[in-house]
Image: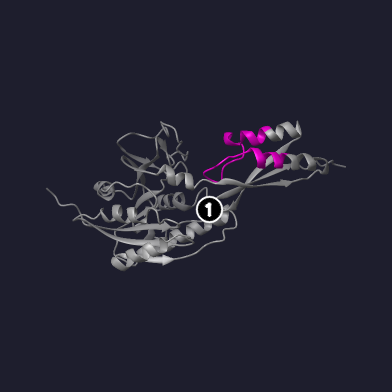
Amino acid sequence: MNNPLRRKVAICALFRNSASYVDYFRAVMSSQTREHIELLFSFVEGDSTDDTKTRLQAWAAADDRVILSHVDVEPVADFADRVTKWAMLGNVAVEQALPTDCTHVLWCESDLVIPFDLLDQLLADPADIVAPAIFLGTLFYDTWGFRGQDGIRFSNEAPYHREFRHQARVPLSSVGSCVLFRRELFDQGVRFRGSYDDGLLVGVCRDAAALGYHTFMDSRVAVVHPTSLWKRQQYTLGAVDVQCFRPEHYEVLASAAQRVASEVRITIGSVDMSSDHPVFAPVHAIMHALLADAPYAVRLRLSSERDKQYALILSDLPAPRVLP
């Protein structure tokens, strides 16, 4: 029997208020070691209000394979600022690993439930970029990062995407959440970009593709996002603002804002959602009831990343200009 090629994998992760699962992450990631798999760890922690930093420092003190940086990014001004800073933190973790002799980089969200043999499975068949499937209960979890070769995002409900295949290595245009990369693509300058639709892990996959690298999902391997932690990451409605262009609508808009603030309890997973998403139907019902046939708009913005809150902006539309 041929011996597997020896690989050295740099496990990169970000941490913030992660004390409840740092010990689990340490145990499951440390268990990835094999005779042919060597590990090192490149971590960035910041803005924690619990003892995440202390726990990671203890890990680093006991394990000389751990590279640990502390980088705070709060306050976060808005969603675009959040994405930019997330990309910056990701690049810090990757660039800490590149001076080592690692052959691969595993990007992994630190709150996932990981198989003890994740790396053994992903390394079994050579690939430039490969990710396990990822689920939240029976739902496909990362519907932002996982996109078919047609560029269309996966959906939460089965069959997830027309290109999805069970128990197979499936070529995709991008993947997310937990991804194994050949280090060479980072050596060629690929990094996280701070734009949401085509940046972050999607941007890494796209920029790597431009250099000739290929991306796959291996549906024979799966990780799980814990439901309890997912609930903690949801955004709640923190404020309802009014933007009025026509004075005759101000009182009505103010009344609508009061009703939305008192009656609506909508949690969302991301502030990049469109306001015409079905979850906002109660908001539109209030607006229709009070504004009748008058045109209006509903927008979202990040209110507080630290407190996981979003704001709704209710507005009328400017009166049409009358040409002379």
* x and y percentages locating residue 239 in the rendered image: 65, 48
Q: Secondary structure at mark 1?
A: loop
Tell me the quarter of the picture where residue 43 sits. bottom left
290 or 128, nearer to the observer: 290
Q: Is residue 322 magenta?
A: no
305 or 98, nearer to the observer: 305
Visible in this render: residue 98? no
From the image, tell me which residue sits under label 1.
195
* x and y percentages locating residue 106 in the rendered image: 34, 54
- Report the number of discs: 1
**Image side of residue 106 versus residue 282, left or right:** left
**Image side of residue 83 versus residue 141, left or right:** right
Q: Is residue 270 magenta?
A: yes
Tell me the quarter of the picture where residue 275 sits. top right
Q: Going 37% across and 66% down the picture, which residue do you hit?
A: 57
Disc 1 residue type? Ser
Q: Crowding at label 1, few (<14), some or many (≥20) Cα neighbours within 10 Å?
A: some
* x and y percentages locating residue 85 in the rendered image: 51, 59
* x and y percentages locating residue 308 in the rendered image: 54, 50
Q: Going 66% across and 42% down the picture, which residue do you hit?
A: 261
- Find the magenta span and give its range: 256-285
The C terminus lies in quadrant: top right
